[in-house]
Image: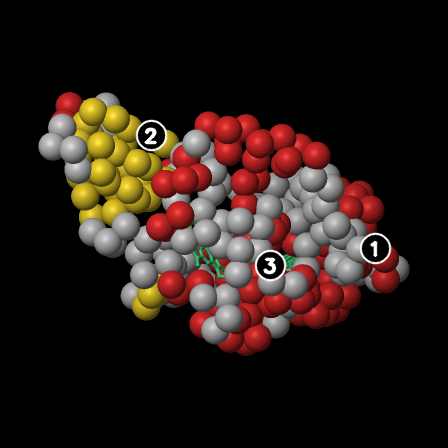
Amino acid sequence: MTITTFSRFGRRLSLSAFCSLFLSLSAQAQDTSDHQYTSASIQAGSRVYVQQCALCHGPQGDTIDGVNLRRGQFRTATSDEDLARIISGGAAGGRMPAFNLRPEELNGVIAYIRAGFDPEGVAIRIGDPARGKAIYDGKGECSECHRINGVGHRTAPDLSDIGLIRTPAILQASLTNPSSTLQPINRQVRLVTRTEEVVMGRRLNEDTYSVQLIDSNEQLRSLRKSDLVSYELSSVPVHQPTSLNSDEVADLVGYLLTLRGLE
Ligand code: HEC
Ligand code: HEC
């Protein structure tokens, strides 16, 4: 288990930690060997998409009602098998035509969609949502920090609709390469007040005069900046790259994609 806990968070704020993390990141190579989709496949898929799909779905994949291919929002499809079936067989009584693609073209265009339309994207793999849920609830210990539809803790972002707001590529990277996906608003803060109280937590909101956060006791706090003697914002994510193997990561991504809020 390599995810750091909140108690260790204070130590991670040091400047040298920021710098060394940054350096190690730029040198890090992405291992794609055991993934289903390679970067080459994603690039091949981008060509198929531009030639065959963009006409109707648009360059950003969002021109058809209820479908946003770049964000992974579909009408009926959830798995890669569903996507393959729809692309090869057509949909909506022929309004979406059937495509007779070669296997590598079909794989490629699915990979391109799953990579969030990023031709430079890393290999993405989407596994089984049911297995992913079991990992989430079990050995992944995700609910120690996260909350889904009211269950779990509040120290980390609520994941109830994460499948709507993040692409598969970003979800995978949140686990395998967290520094690349840290959202500014999710950054950890350490505040010291005039009364010498130290408050650590996750920033929710901030304006010129105040900052709102969830502290390490899961309390919502709003503090006036004029009451603070120090305010540090960490650029180091709480997540370390996960120690789960790539099958488990794929299953977790499959599960997270099914989280679409209360529909
Ligand atoms: C002639 C227009 C057209 C072209 C070309 C086209 N599509 Fe579609 N596609 C549609 C329409 C219309 C829908 C909505 C179907 C519905 O209403 O259920 C759709 C839906 C989809 C869906 C969601 C289906 C679901 O039920 O979840 C996917 C995925 C998709 N298209 C992928 C592609 C890909 C990949 C290509 C290129 C290989 C492509 N489409 C080319 C018109 C098109
Ligand atoms: C120790 C607490 C902790 C645990 C355990 C944890 N997370 Fe997180 N997670 C966070 C925090 C805090 C963030 C906000 C970004 C950061 O600081 O890393 C986050 C961010 C995320 C995000 C990105 C959210 C966004 O808005 O894009 C995803 C996805 C995620 N976690 C999934 C998981 C999964 C899946 C597990 C279990 C394998 C897990 N987390 C375990 C604390 C945790």
Residue 197 seen in the figure: yes
The residue furthest right is 102
- The mark found on residue 169 in the picture is none
- Residue located beneath label 2 in the image: 232
Q: Callout 3: few (<14), some (14-19), or many (20+) C-alpha neighbours within 10 Å?
A: some
From the image, state whether disc 2 or disc 1 is nearer to you: 2
What SS does tag 1 mark? helix
- Residue located beneath label 3 in the image: 243
Amino acid type at mark 3: Ser
Left or right, residue 144 beside residue 227: right
Amino acid type at mark 2: Glu
List x then y, in percent, for residue 240.
53, 49
Amino acid type at mark 1: Glu
List x then y, in percent, for residue 193.
17, 31
Q: Which one is earlier in the sequence, the residue at label 1 or at label 3?
A: 1
Instruction: Give the residue drawn at x 25%, y 54%.
Output: 218
Q: How many angstroms separate mark 3 from mark 2 (CA)?
A: 28 Å
CB contact under 8 Å: marks 1 and 3: no
- Residue located beneath label 1 in the image: 105
Q: Callout 1: few (<14), some (14-19), or many (20+) C-alpha neighbours within 10 Å?
A: some
CB contact under 8 Å: marks 2 and 1: no
Q: How many angstroms separate mark 2 from mark 1 (CA)?
A: 49 Å
- Taking depth in this image into account, of 87 and 211 the one nearest to the observer is 211
Q: How many angstroms separate mark 1 from mark 3 (CA)?
A: 32 Å
Label 3 CB, ligand 2: below 8 Å?
no
List x then y, in percent, for residue 231.
28, 28
Q: Quadrant of the C terminus?
A: bottom left
What SS does tag 3 mark? loop
Q: Which one is earlier in the sequence, the residue at label 2 or at label 1?
A: 1
Instruction: Give the residue drawn at x 31%, y 56%.
Output: 154
Q: Callout 2: few (<14), some (14-19), or many (20+) C-alpha neighbours within 10 Å?
A: few
